[in-house]
Image (cartoon, rainbow, N blue to C red):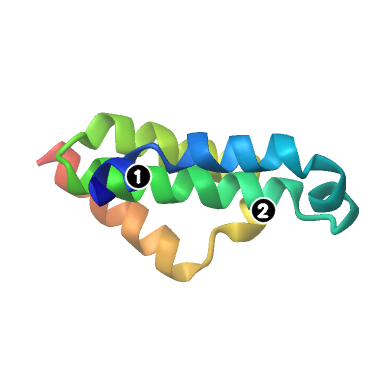
Amino acid sequence: MTSNIHRDYHKVRKFIYRQHRAFINSQGMRRRFLANSYWRSAKGRWMRGEHRAAMCFALWSLAIGRETMDLDRISQLTAWASATNS
């Protein structure tokens, strides 16, 4: 059950965003809120062996919220990319 939640976490966060759009936007957190949801879905999909989908979600996260990409996330993304190419 929990692995499915992580796998589709972006759907949960999109629902939350729709319900609380005004508040999240007023805090200037829209991009960070959504980017983090895609990153978490990427991690969940990677753990389930869905590597290509994980890379798509990770790149989508990067495209939405570049400010959320810290050194840990960049190194994890690099590790995923090299594991996918092996």
The quadrant of the rendering that contains the N terminus is top left
In the image, 68 versus 44, the foreground residue is 44
Which amino acid, mark 2?
Arg
Q: Report the residue marked by disc 2.
A: 32
Q: Report the residue marked by disc 1.
A: 5
Q: State whether residue 14 is above or below residue 76.
A: above
Q: State whether residue 6 is above or below residue 76.
A: above
Rate crowding at label 1 as few (under 14), some (14 to 19) or many (20 or more) other CA atoms within 10 Å: some
Asked if residue 34 shows in the view, the reply is: yes
Name, please, the residue furthest toward the left. 86
Q: CA distance from mark 2 to mark 1?
A: 19 Å
Which amino acid, mark 1?
Ile
2 and 1 marks in contact (CB < 8 Å): no
Asked if residue 81 shows in the view, the reply is: no
- Give how far across and how far down residue 77 sits, in percent: 35, 52
- Give how far across and how far down residue 11 sits, in percent: 50, 34
The quadrant of the rendering that contains the C terminus is top left
- Give how far across and how far down residue 36 sits, in percent: 54, 52
Rate crowding at label 2 as few (under 14), some (14 to 19) or many (20 or more) other CA atoms within 10 Å: some
Q: How many marks?
A: 2
- Disc 1, SS: helix
For marks 2 and 1 on the same chain, the one whose residue lies earlier in the sequence:
1
Tell me: 9 left or right of 27. left
Residue at the spot x=79%, y=51% of the render? Answer: 24
Tell me: 59 left or right of 32. left
Q: Nearer the viewer, mark 2 or mark 1?
A: 1
Q: State whether residue 46 is above or below residue 28.
A: above
